[in-house]
Image: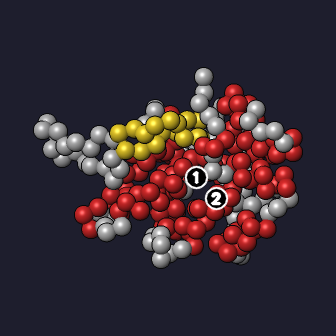
Amino acid sequence: MEDIWLEKLSLIGRAAEAYAAGDLSAVKLRAERLYLGKRYPFVVSAEYPYPLHLFSPRLFAMLVDAASYPEAQEAWEIITARENIIKMIAATEIRRTAAEILGPMFEEKYPPAQDDNIMPRKQMIGYMIKIAMECFGYSSAPGRMQIDTTRKLENPNRRTNYFKSATRYTKITPTGRDMLLDQIGNADLKKHFRAITDLIIAGQTEYQKVYKTAALTSWEAL
């Protein structure tokens, strides 16, 4: 039995509500502020033309408030790099945490011993990972997983990790989608929620077609 609830999602429900109500002014302003003159990232389709990640007011605040969230733009670019999306999905598929696979990278980028902002930064990165994973069809699983960073005697050079614990994610399946739909009463909202979710599950959003996370690259193509 899948444990999946609307309140665990940060984007898809908000996006469906906005499109169902025709109230897109807020996300339009966010997109223009961040990406004016540029190609919008994380666009679902021609029918859903605004960046999916910007339906999170919290993420938008992080990306525009450099004083409160130092290096937020840089962290978001690292997390949403194609190679790192693939790493996080692969870690999730073997029931590990998405954050764990990026931990060594962030530890090198922001050395904990030199970081006076470490806990807020970890929280920021953790939330950004949640948003990125939802864009690719994953919902947070119950509880947190401990990340073993102990330097064992037989392997004193073992690398530590930026994170000590992190959230695990689970893929939203058609069954999970139906459970989510059962939690929605409004027919128009349900229609948009299903349309967006179905495209994500099928890997057919505009951004998933660009990311090609399941594609293989041969030596000759490199």
Dot 2 falls on a residue whose secondary structure is: loop
For residue 163, above or below residue 194: below
Q: Do tag 1 and tag 2 residues touch (Cβ < 8 Å)?
A: yes
Q: Residue at x 43, y 48 (%)?
A: 99
Please tell me how crowded label 2 is: few (under 14), some (14-19), or many (20+) other residues with Cα within 10 Å: some
User: Residue 164, percent across and down?
Assistant: 33, 47
Give me the disc on residue 131. 1
Please tell me how crowded label 1 is: few (under 14), some (14-19), or many (20+) other residues with Cα within 10 Å: many
Q: Earlier in the sequence, mark 1 or mark 2?
A: 2
For residue 154, above or below residue 164: above
Q: In this view of the protein, can residue 48 be seen by the observer?
A: no
Q: Residue at x 44, y 57 (%)?
A: 123
For residue 73, above or below residue 97: below
User: Residue 40, percent across and down?
Assistant: 70, 64
Dot 1 falls on a residue whose secondary structure is: helix
For residue 106, above or below residue 134: below
User: Residue 51, percent across and down?
Assistant: 70, 60
Q: In front: 48, or 30?
A: 30
Frontmost of labels 1 and 2 is 2
Q: Amino acid at mark 1?
A: Ile
Q: Quadrant of the N terminus?
A: top right
Q: Quadrant of residue 54?
A: bottom right
Q: Amino acid at mark 2?
A: Ser
User: Residue 184, percent across and down?
Assistant: 77, 39
Q: In the rendered view, does 79 fall on the left or right side of 199?
A: left
Q: In front: 39, or 145?
A: 145
Mark 1 and mark 2: Cα distance apart in space: 8 Å
Q: Residue at x 33, y 58 (%)?
A: 107
Which residue is disc 2 drawn over?
Answer: 56
